[in-house]
Each structure stands twice: as structure tokens, then as C-alpha cells.
Amino acid sequence: MSRRRRGGLWIIVSDRVSIFLCVSPGVQATFSQQPQDLVVVAGQPVTLPCSIPGYHGVVLWIKDGLALGVGRDLSGYPRYTVIGDHSTGEHHLRIQRVELMDDAVFECQAIQAAMRSRPARLTVLVPPEDPVISGGPVVSLRAGDPLNLTCHADNAKPAASIIWIRNGEVLNGAMYSKTLLRDGRRESTVSTLYLSASNIETGQQIICRASNKAVPNGKETSVNIDIQHLPLVNLSVEPQPILEGNLVKFHCSAKANPPVTLYRWAKGGNVIKEFSGDTYEVIVDHSFFTEPVSCEVTNPLGSTNISRNVDVYFGPRMAAEPQSLQVDLGSDAVFNCAWTGNPSLTIVWMKRGSGVVLSNENILTLKAVRQEDAGKYVCRAVVPRVGAGEKEVSLTVNGPPTISSTQTHQALHGEKGEIKCFIRSTPPPDRIAWSWKETVLESGTSGRYTVETVSTEEGVISTLTMSNIVPADFQTIYNCTAWNSFGSDTEIIRLKEQGGSQSSTGSTSTLTLWFGIRPLIDNLKGYFKMFAIEALLSTVLTQSLMNSYIPF
């Protein structure tokens, strides 16, 4: 920018620097060449002409009102050079590799002659960057889905125009928008193309072409359309049928677009991490018959899952285990036993020790059970030509207690002695009592006598302990009696002196008579148990016999 002053001219070189040049009004000169409006593409060189024949003064180049320098000194602008023969008045401005910042108005001024050229507009064109189609170079979509393509052509001056081409034909209907960038000169363009599913085919190529005055022929890019689908899967199992314990091969064949990225195997819903390919080999067991093997094939669109069971032959396996029962006399007993096997199996119920088949069904029902029905029952399953299995259960019938004991126990005079009775009872005994002479003791201590009762898995053990054994203890009859809701039982037990000898023949005869009569008592007890009075009978008979003979 210049400002005239009497006798000279102020030249503004920059915001902070200005110089004053003297002007000689008598100097006569004219422009033979002046800069003209030019349009140039960024990156190309350009020359702005300025010729003033016969003028030998200072020449300035002005850009948008600011001097680029004095004379030929343009050191502040390394891409700018003043060229030409100075002696003939040539002061041309050469710009190397034009940039967007060169888009401006230029003047050539002859200072001493007070002359300036016409303003010349240098317009810099910027071609768009290479267009980009979002998602390219291959755009994938599911079969049946519409296609949306977006193409960007950025940083162009002027804004780029975009067209879409398929098979040599321009596609119409695209949406177009542009955005002015911060420098206020360049623009970015976006074009969106929508195609319905019926208007696209896999393998088609669609081109986006962007052009402006800087690149009239345009720049282009393209995408290929890829119609994709989920994996189509087939699962084969070989060989079948097969006996458990043998090798089976599963093969998962799949067709997919895009290609398969993952195979995942599972059995019964549980992932098999050790295998990740299209083949799974395994030694099969019975579980493969009920738990299907699945192959899940995945590609970027999703997964397809297919499963198969194996026709495995296997022997019987327990599905519902029967439970032992305890029932009251006269009630029904119902056992339930379920097996699985392949091929079909046969079920047989029998009582242990008997060859009689009681049932061929899962359920065995015994009506109005009796004491003799108690025992072990077997549920047996057979898979022909494969194998067999069985399960044993117990039936316990509730009834009166049963006492068993050694009828004679030994002890030392003056020491501690004890006698025991073992009671089997279902249900457990409600009461256990020891009686001798005039004494009845169920638990605790009475004088020298103590009763302790211990429960075991097999039954109840009741122990009568005597401290400081005296001779009379060897002459006493001890009675162990147990009761439950179904009746009672009694056992008679004697205490014998350890290492002692019989004092008389009469004693020996009495003992012999006692053990000879004992079976008779047991028979009578068995008869009267029907009336739940066996304990009373046993006590009466015993005391009567012992009162009739001399004790030993």
C-alpha cells in the first residue's frame, strides 16, 4: 500500500515497516506489459508480467495492498522472484508452486514515475483430495438390505461436484451437501447415494467421481458390492450307530459370505474349548445319546448353530434310583426304579434269593405286606447284547422287637461284671427294662447296678453292669425286655462265675433242666407274641421254673 506525500511516497511494506521514497515528477515512463487476471492450479508456477521501458527507478510489487519488498529484494517471500532484464525495464514477478495463500490482488508500481499497473487478480484453484467412499473398497450388506453409500471430496476450491456411476451410467437421486472450511476459501463436499435392495447385485462396482475447475476430468474411487449371508451349515456324524467307548467324528461343513471366522463346539450346552476347527473327534459314552453335540459357525454377520445326537449303544444306567422302604405290617410297599439304555431295555423285579419275577415295570407294588415280605429286592435291567445292571433295596416291616443275647455271661467274684442284650426293633423300642428278683431298672443306677443303653446302626445294645460281684449275683435270673408300638420281646440271661466249679450234682441237674426247658419257653413266646404279652409270659414261666429247682 502506498500513500502519496509532497515530494515523495510512503510505501507500507508490512504492518510495522514503511519506507519513504522520493518521487521525480519529471520522469516519463509507461507500462509496456502489465499483470493480468490469472487462474492457476495450486502447485503450478506462474509469472505476472511488468515491463516499463526507459524507467530505471525503483519498482515495487504490491500484494493485497502490502509491498512485497523494495526493488528486486523479496527475501521475505522465498517462493517469489523478480525476473527479467532490469536495464530494459523488465520487472516480472515469478511465483514457484502456487499456494492458496497466493490467491490475491497484485500490482506493479514504478515509484519515481508515480505509476501503478492495473490490479491483477490471481485466482488459485485447489483440486479436491482423492474422494473416499465410506466403508470401501468393498461394501458388504445382508441380502435384502438397502444400500447407502457416502462419498467425501474434501478441501477443494471451488467445491467439488460429485457424480455416481454404475456400468458406465450416471446414477441419479444422490443427496449433495458442502461445507466451507475455516480458511473461508476451501470447501468439502459430501454425496449420499441410496439404492433399494432390488436395485443392487453382488459383484457390482459403483464409482464416485469428484471434479472441479482444477481437475475437470475429476478424481474417482470405487467400491465393490458384496451381498452377504449367514453361514449355511451341515453337521455329519460318522459312524452311527456306535457302541459307547468308540471313536466318533463330527464334521461341520459351512458355506458363508463373508468367510467363516470361528467354529465353536458344544455338548449339552457346554462349550468344548479344546476344539476350534471344523472337525471334532471324541470317544463317545452314553451321554452323547441324550446331550446333543452342536457346531456353531460364525462370520462377521452372525452365527448359525446346528446340533445332532449320536445313536450310542450303551448298557443300563440308573435314571431314578429306588429307595429302601420301612412300612407297617399290612400296608402297601411301592418301589420305583427307572433305567435308561440303548437299544430298548427290559426291567425285572425279584426278591433276593427267589427266582420269581415280581414285575417287568418300573414300579413294584407289594400289597398288604407281612413280616416274611421283609428282605432285599433287586431291580435288574438288561439291554440285549450290550449289558445289564441291577440295584438292591431293602424292605423293612415294622413289628415287635427281637432280642438276641448270650444266655450266660461270666464274671469274677468281687470284680465288676456286666450282661448285655441286643435289640433289633422297627420302629425303635419305646422302652427297655432289666428286671431281677423284685427290682426293675430302665436306666441309671440303683445300688450296685447300672443300666446303659447305646444305639447302633444295627440296633440297640442295653448293658446291665454290677459292681463288686457277690455269690448271690450268680444265682439270680436277669430279664431284659423291650417294647415298641407293635409289641415286646424278653430274653433271660444268667451270670456265671468265671473259672468256678459246680458245687453239687443237683446244681448241674438244675442247669441241665433249665436249658432243656428253654426251647419250650421260646416256642411259647413265639405263640403268645401274637397277643403282645410275651414279656409277661416269659417272666412268669421263668420265675416258676427257678422256684421249683435249686439254683446253681
Image (spheres, grey):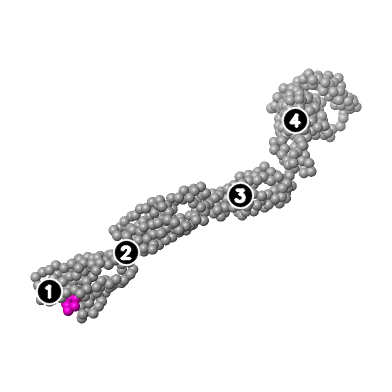
Question: Looking at this rendering, what residue extends furthest in the front direction?
Answer: 169
- Note whether 456 is above or below 479 in the view shown: below
Point out the tag, 2 or 4, that comes first from the N-terminus.
Answer: 2
Within 10 Å of disc 4 (Cα), the crowding (few <14, some 14-19, many 20+) is: some
The label number, if any, that marks residue 23 in the structure image: 1
Question: Looking at this rendering, what residue extends furthest in the bottom direction?
Answer: 87
Residue 504 part of the magenta-drawn span:
no
Front position in the image: 228 or 67: 228
C-alpha distance separating marks 1 and 3: 94 Å
Q: What residue type is labelled 1?
A: Val
Point out the tag, 4 or 3, that comes first from the N-terminus.
Answer: 3
The reply to whether discs 4 and 3 touch (Cβ–Cβ < 8 Å) is: no
The N terminus: image quadrant: bottom left
The reply to whether discs 1 and 3 touch (Cβ–Cβ < 8 Å) is: no
Q: Is the magenta stretch mostly helix, strand or loop?
A: loop
What residue is disc 4 on? 364
C-alpha distance separating marks 2 and 4: 100 Å
Stretch in magenta: 52-58
C-alpha distance separating marks 4 and 3: 48 Å
Residue 347 placement, left or right of 251: right
Q: Which amino acid does label 3 sit on?
A: Val
Nearer mark to the viewer, of 2 and 4: 2
Point out the tag, 1 or 3, that comes first from the N-terminus.
Answer: 1
Q: Which amino acid does label 2 sit on?
A: Leu
Q: Residue at x 42, y 58 (%)?
A: 208
What residue is disc 2 on? 125
Percent position of residue 198, x then y: 49, 48
Residue 56 part of the magenta-drawn span:
yes
SS class, disc 4: strand
